[in-house]
Amino acid sequence: MTPMVHLLLLPFLLSIASGKKLEERKGPFENTVLEVPEGTAVPYAVYQFQVKQASVNDFRLSGEGTNDIKISKDGWLYLEKPLVWSEDNHFITKVEALADGEVVDGPIYVTINVIDVNNNAPIFNQSSYTTWVRENNPAGVPFIQVFASDQDDPETPNAQLTYSLVSQIPNNHNILLFQIDPNTGEISTTAEGEKMLKSKEGIRYSRGEDRSIEALKGKFNEYCSVPKVPYEENPFFTCVERAELKRRAKDPLEDPDYTLIVRVQDLGGASPSALSGNARVHIAVQQNQWINPGPISIKENLKDSYPKVIAKVQSNDPDAIYTLTQKERGLRFPFQITEDGEILVTEELDREEKDMYILVVLAKNNNDQEVDPPMEIQVLVEDENDNKPVCTEEESVFEIQEDESEGSEVGTLLAHDSDKEGTLNSQLAYTIVPQNLPTASDTFSIDGASGRIQTLRVLRRKEQRVYNLSVRVSDSAFSTVCKVVIKVIDVNNEMPLFEKNDYGSHSLTEDTPVGFTVVTIRASDADDPDSGSSRIEFHISAGDDDGVFTVETDGEGVGHLVVAKPLDFESSSTYKLQIDARNPEPLMSGLEYGSDSTTFVSLSVSDVDEVPEFSLDILDVTVPENTTKGTVLLTVEAKDPEGKEIGFKLSGDTENWLDIDAATGQIKTKDKLDRETLETFEVTITAFEKENPEKFSERVLHVRLLDVNDDFPKLIEKQAFICMKDLKPVIIKAEDKDSDPFSQPFTFTLDKPNRNSNWELRKIDDTTAELHLKKRPTEDKTFSLNINIKDNGGVGVSQALEVKVCNCTELGYCYIPPHGVPFKLGMGSTIGILAGVLGFCALIFIIVIKRSNKKGKNKGLGDEEERNAMTQN
């Protein structure tokens, strides 16, 4: 672009930029990242760099994108050609500021990210698809998948595709028989399609059956009388023949049963500006002979000849090989399948053993590949009345108290029948079998449907204590007799009586252990032994509101008064217990318990010197590690049961961080805490009687320190080297004693002036980075780099890393000449040494010439002159 064209173009560029907040498109001359939408109309002003040097009068671009991107003399970066995201979505261009053609600032690097716009419509990989689908194809099971692609950015909604069904041809009943998955493009039948899809009728063939025209003539003869005219002239046969041949050679593209128009849209199909593409799917419906014949019902215990055919299946592949398995694991599988698909039951079935079988039929080809999906067939075993009722117990025993009113319930007899529940085969009826002694049938009745037994009169124990009944339980074909024993138990007309109404006074020390027996008490009952009326229970009814004591008994009239909770002299020093004797069975109407069923026990508790007691059993405290010195962490509380003065002490503090006030129990910090030294620790707090320190108790205090960001990441290694011949990156690693969230991940950056130099940092993981040397230096050199490492909380400092760039040995280490001085010299040193050697040689040459001249002159002198000349020299 000529300067004149540039001058004409610049006002136009600025006018475009001024319409879009000109000031926002200006900035300092430094590394910059810019974003430009693709397809932007040109010329387009992108950004203006503002330099500090007043002498700058031009700029120079180099690197990527310079054919499309230009810069004006006043620093305006602009587009000369529209950008295309699919061709290149990323440019890195170098910019230098010039003064009269000389670089005075930079270079800086401008990264231009091309932003994708939705300017590519999605395209199907085929304009039309052809496929077959069978009748009764399960709804939702895909039989074909269409696919489309979009050249826009796959990370944006511009390439987010959604599939939809536009139309179905034909659609005579306005019912969609097909559906498409909007995300995957998979096409399947709807629930209506599973039921309504029908193919043209065709001839069915058995496994291995001939399918030639001659065979077709034989099948034609099965349905029609032998024709009197040749087959070729018979219009009925030629119609069947044409239909059969057409069915075999059907092409979904030439003769589809259905055609679907499918659409794909970008932007997820949710925007009116979404772009779209279309395709056609031609579908032919195939006849489906693979039809489930179930469920199949078979009578149990069926008397017939076996094996017996119960069903037949037909694969869509006439040459299919059938196999039959059982879905559930079972010991017995009385079924088989023939090569023609006939399913056989091989023996009688028993419903009580198994009431349903699930058969799985597989149809495979000679290569053991499935030609039809596995078919599950239910076989239901129908019940017959082949089980008689069974008594739940060999002898059912019931109890009823004497003097109960007529109609009182005795109990319910339980029986069961293994035949099918809810049928007449398992419906039971109950009747009392008449006996020689008529008293049973006159005394009890039983509900014929439920087996509930009730009394017909008031029972007296003195008349008869036990009744034995026989109850017949019947179904519609069988019956059994169950034995029933009914015991008449004694009415509670006698009260328990204590042998003493007062068991005196007893003394206990307050440290008496729990479980100690204080006194044994006894009572008796005159009711019938071994009944609830004679069983005795003891209850403390007064004098012990806190439940310090209890009475243990076996119900036979002997009780043991024991200590149930620790005694406390300070809480209560005396007790007067009232103990009642009671029966679990209620007393006969009109009777009440009297004083003879109650006794008393007096107790006194003597004091002992007990150890101090802490108010809390568990002591826990959590504090930040930067807690200041002298901060109160916790005040422990304890008291002496006898009210004596107590003191506190602390032990087990290995770091000497804590202190306790001996009088108040107040625990303070006496030094700086450090979680990195010890995250959790325990100390023992002791409370003791000042007058008698041997009386003490202890509690463990658990202390947990919370981390604060008081450490920064530090380099593990501060020296490294790089071989000149192989500029492999230096792996630098840092560590931080803090814990999450004040530790990793770390951020690594180079401090100025190294930030834009020949060095580059790349992060590897949360704690590691790579230091790259971009260009090989001309000589061995040691570089000191400042690397700033910050933790996840933003805390960090710059740290020096010394990197030596050197010639290396074959083993990959810096070469060190003898005496530790690198042998190889730099270019300047080499030139200096060479110049010195040449100068030294010239000096020697001049001296030699001079000496030669003097010797020639001295030959004409006398001896004396010669001596003088030598002296002068």
Image: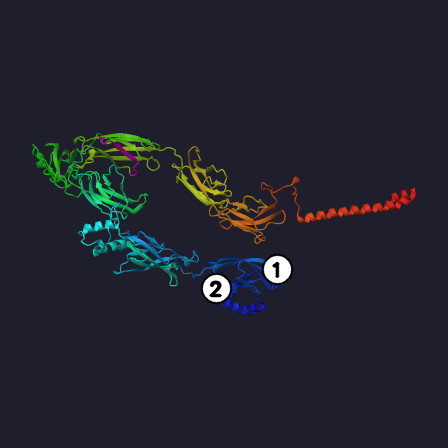
Spot occupied by residue 202 in the image (x, y as percentages of width and height): 24, 52
Q: CA distance from mark 1 to mark 2?
A: 31 Å
Q: Amino acid at mark 1?
A: Val
Image quadrant holding the N terminus, namely: bottom right
The residue closer to the viewer here, 311 or 849, is 311
User: In the figure, residue 327 lies in which quadrant?
Assistant: top left
User: Helix, strand, or loop for circle 2?
Assistant: loop
- Observer-side mark, 1 or 2, equals 2
Q: Which residues are magenta?
A: 545-557
User: Helix, strand, or loop for circle 1?
Assistant: strand
The residue closer to the viewer here, 763 or 501, is 763
The disc label shown at residue 103, or none: 1
Q: How many marks?
A: 2
Image quadrant holding the C terminus, namely: top right
Q: Predominant secondary structure in magenta?
A: loop
Q: Which residue is mark 2?
A: 40
Q: Amino acid at mark 2?
A: Thr
